Image (spheres, helix red, strand yellow):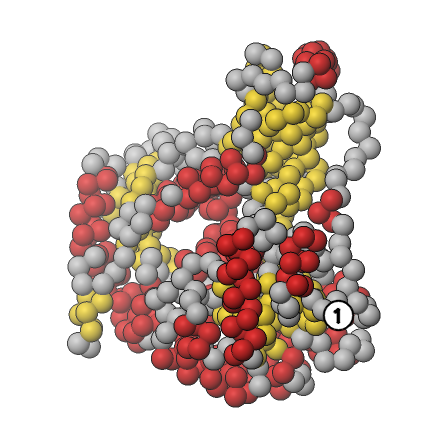
Amino acid sequence: MDKKKKKFALVKVVVSNFPNLLITFGNDIAHQVLYEVSHRLTKYMDNKGLAFHSYTDVWYLVFYSVRNIEKVVEKMMGILQNPINIDDEKVHLIINVGMTRYPDHGINVEELMKHTMIATLSAVKHGPGGKDIYTEEENIALLKKAQLRQDLFECIQKNELYLEYQPKVCVKSLAVTGAEALIRWQHPIWGNVSPAEFIPLIKEIGLEENLTLFVIDEAVKQLKQWQKAGISSPKLSINLSPECLLLPGLYSYLKSILKKYKVSPKQLEIEITEDVKLKYNATILNTLAKIQDLGINIALDDMGEGFSSLYDLVNYKIDTLKIDRRAIDELENCNSQRTIIKGLLDICDELGIKTVVEGVERKAQFDVLREMDCDEIQGFYFSPSISSQEMEKWFQMSYAIPSTQSDVRQIERRKYFRVKLPHSLYAEMRILTIRDKEINLERDTVILVQNIGPGGLMFYSYLQLPVNVLIIYQFEMDILGSQFSFAGKIVWHNEHRKGIYAHGVEFQINEAERERLTSALFKLSALVRDKPTYTDNSILEDDPVLYLRKLNVKRKV
């Protein structure tokens, strides 16, 4: 594109509730909706520009003029959101729109498309009917989300999705009773992406069916491989949302996959997560009954989070109840939690429902649950999620041995010293380049530095960032009243606490910058040694985990 050419606007239109329309009204009506949207857009764009149907629920519009573009788009959204009458059904659409202007927001197709996608993601965050125009004031989190959303369409074909497995352990005997299959995504740029990041995106773009079929096939295939390795009747659970249970043919697919790999239905368990709008749907309850008749166990997941209730224990006729980690986070210190958990375990015992407690991280939690006669646990106290090869070794154990992983600290052979800070050092971070391409992000991402030296630093963040030498970051902070700015790459990372990640950084700086930093760190080290409680305007005395979790919640609102 040539900057001298006439300005125009690129607009992305998304029917955000299309996946729900597909479930509610079926394929025929849903596709008639797509036709009607295309018809309305084509009619509205007459003499204003061009309209393109990109894929399923997405259209791109090119407006010849950028004048009053937001008002023009608002009028267009009003037209699209008028109800559509099809076969005596009145269909209401939820429209979200992202906008960019050429050349202000990009001088080539790649830049404009990327920035339009970012604007659309921002519009979706505003809620139904939200619209937004791209601004440079975007941070790493939104850039990452935009790239992930775009790459999800091909991740299965590129074999980037895979399963890991977290062992389940009998509380009384410490025998390994089974495992939970957990979906993972190894992204070529962003590394190992958390399911909490990409599962909501999969739902947004309507790929949940593809993911569900992939997980079922991979899980049952893995059960067969363990059997071939000599594991006697290994058991595995997989997660399905209530929306998945509405998929036509799910029961038949499960039956065919078990037959294909010659695996007994009793080795498979389906964990259903709650959805307050769908969980009492008659179709869902009917599908669950058929699945149980096949011999597959049903578990109710995340009890203790959201809207789960005791009525669910009866309504779903479940075999297993999984108690969420949040219900036991202070179990050894909180009388209320102990009373509630003990009562829940006793109720399940009376009803003949097996209990599994998730997120057990400490011996004290385990000891309390053992006293309460809980059936099984899973969590970092024994093991995080592991590969299929590692899980095979767990199945071969006579009994499980508690892990010390939570006490392991990152060991590095450092060339330079590090100053361990008494409290977190407030700092900001942005991406400088990805694969040598400049990334322009005006808004920085807050991080909390825990230690720092002339060679690098360690920080906490609510973002899980990859170990990738092709991504160079810039770090800015204040040390003893002086401003410092360093380029660096992430060389290791791990999950410090649930949803909070520790990252190790190696600086890429010249010797003059290193000498200036070293001088400041010697002074800081002396201050910390003489006064362990030292603090200043850049030192954050808040608990870093709580601070970052609150920051992440505010970011999502």
| Residue 274 appears in the figure | yes
SS class, disc 1? loop
Q: Residue at x 75, y 70 (%)?
A: 173
Q: Is residue 141 left or right of residue 520?
A: left
Instruction: Say above or below: 37 vs 557.
Output: below
The answer to which quarter of the image holds residue 540 is top right
Q: Quadrant of the N terminus?
A: top left
Instruction: Give the residue displayed 58% in from the left and 30% down from the top.
Output: 448
The answer to whether one can see residue 47 in this image is no
Image quarter in which the C terminus is found: top left
Viewer-side residue, 179 vs 131: 179
Q: Which residue is mark 1?
A: 173
Q: Is residue 184 left or right of residue 130?
A: right
Counting from the top left corner in percent of width and height, residue 226 is at 75, 74
Q: Amino acid at mark 1?
A: Ser
> Residue 175's spot in the image, x, y percent?
75, 70
Quarter where residue 70 is shown: top left
